[in-house]
Image (cartoon, grey):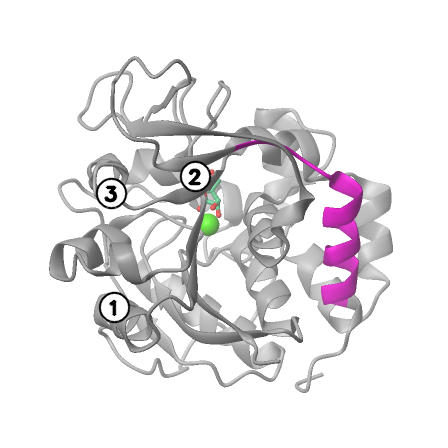
Amino acid sequence: MSKRKFFIDTDTATDDAVALVMALQHPDVDVLGISTVAGNCTIEQATQNALYTRDLVGSTVPVHVGANGPLMRPLQTAHHVHGKDGMGDIGLPLHSRKPASHRGVQAMIDAIMNSPGDVELVTLGPLTNLALALRLEPAIVGALKRVVTMGGTAVLPGNITPLAEFNFWVDPEAAAIVTNSGLHFEMAGWDISTAHAVIHDELAAELRSLGTLGQFAVDIQGVLREFCRTETVLDGFDLPDPLAMAIALDPSIVTREAQHFVDVIPGDSAARGQTIVDERGASGKDVNCRVIYEADRDRFLHMLHQALRDAGPGN
Ligand code: RIB
Ligand code: CA
């Protein structure tokens, strides 16, 4: 049976990196390409972090540089959450690797249009690249097999503001372009991350003991762990992108969902980046989203163990 085709868009920081490992290690998935986007960190850092992670598992997947900031506003990063280098500031050599191109948006379009109906797109950062791709080639709406997005909140609160999740907040105009493009996407929001993907210290120690990849996956979370201890007040660190990736890899781990029209509030009000889940159809707009409300934590953790246990060709 031929492998599934994935394309991943990422603002590569500490949770994105674990999600990349999960996809790159999966035996049934061929990652056609990775596009980087500014978000958690600068585009240069996101790109070097993605290249480092790819090399760590011995993959040669092309990494293409995408947008260096939001469509209409300055970039606001999350270095306070993921570290100055985006990878936990543990001294990893995150420099001098060469991306395949500086045309991340076109690479995303090409991958999709060259395999119509086959590509599953997973977005792990702000939706700047996807919004640009939709503007450049609207036909990707009909050509994509699936879109799984880590972003938004089906249930409040947000993480960057009481009303918004970081990916949608960084570039709310891009998110609103996506939600109003006719594209159908699956939303793995902040709420299910805090509910089902918190890694407490004992579990982190267990993951770390799995070997090189387990050590990497845990050691880069140190800054995030402190942020969770003091700010988000979680009993561990949470892994939103790996949970979204697990859902992309195995949609059946979702245990509660609904189909609704979802929109995102642009602009600079207190509601910047807020997710609107139209549960009662008040907007009269067509459903565009598989809203994910709950997922199976045990099955997620099994997938995480599996990815971190297997030594990739580069180990
Ligand atoms: O709000 C969490 C999301 O924002 C994750 O994707 C994290 O990596 C950051 O991009
Ligand atoms: Ca991310």
Q: Please say if 209 is above or below 310.
A: above
**Element type where label 2 sits in the image:** loop
Depicted 12 relative to depicted 72: above or below:
below
Left or right of 177 on screen, residue 235: right
Give the residues in magenta.
292-308
- Of circles 3 and 1, the one toward us is 3
**Is the C-beta separation of discs 3 and 2 under 8 Å?**
no
Percent from the top left, x then y, of residue 161?
40, 22
Give the labeled residue for mark 2: 151
> Magenta stretch mostly in which secondary structure?
helix
| Circle 1 residue | 109
Name the N-terminal-most of marks 1 and 2: 1
Residue at mark 1 to residue at mark 2: CA–CA distance = 21 Å
Q: Measured along the vertical axis of the image, is residue 313 above or below residue 190?
A: below
Give the image quarter of residue 297.
Answer: top right
Residue drawn where x is 16% and y is 40% of the image: 73
